[in-house]
Amino acid sequence: MFRIVELPPDSERDYSNFETIDTEGALRAGNRHPAFHKTNTIDYIIILEGEVWALMDKGEVLMKAGDVLIQRGTNHAWSNRSDKPVIIVGVMIEAAPV
């Protein structure tokens, strides 16, 4: 699967229906961000424009235009703490969970 996504700032993002698109039911009490989720894929994420925080179960990293993240089946979320949208490209390949 190949996606290009524009994420608005967290202050403008609507999380009310996120549970319906959470493929693994990873939206659990105690997560640091309402969009935490887990998928059965290897993800290649490229930041095209703006900046976004990549949140994992442990830790977080600020990603900027040109940065790439590769992950496999990890619980994660994207937090746009800026006041501008971020544009992300994602290539997701089906994979067994870790």
Image (cartoon, rainbow, N blue to C red):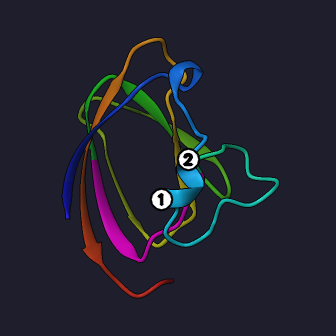
On the image, the x and y values in percent for residue 35 come to: 58, 47
Q: Are marks 2 and 1 in contact (CB under 8 Å)?
A: yes
Is residue 34 shown left or right of residue 3? right
In this view, the residue farthest toward the top is 83
On the image, the x and y values in percent for residue 50 come to: 33, 22
Q: How many marks do you count on the picture? A: 2
Q: Name the foreground residue: 59 vs 48.
A: 48
Q: Which residue is drawn at 61% across and 41% down?
A: 16
Q: Is residue 79 positioned above or below 90 on the image?
A: above
In this view, the residue farthest toward the bottom is 96
Q: Which residue is drawn at 81% across and 56% down?
A: 29
In this view, the residue farthest toward the left is 2
Q: Residue at x 36, y 21 (%)?
A: 85
The residue under label 2 is which amino acid type?
Asn
Q: Is residue 52 positioned above or below 37 on the image?
A: above
* SS at badge 1: helix
Is residue 83 shown left or right of residue 26? left
| Residue 42 on the magenta span | yes
On the image, the x and y values in percent for residue 8 come to: 42, 25
The residue under label 1 is which amino acid type?
Ile
**Residue tagged by mark 2?**
17
Residue 84 occupies which quadrant of the picture? top left
On the image, the x and y values in percent for residue 67 come to: 30, 39
Is residue 97 shown left or right of residue 41? right
Q: Give the range drawn in magenta.
A: 36-45
**Residue tagged by mark 1?**
21
| Residue 38 on the magenta span | yes
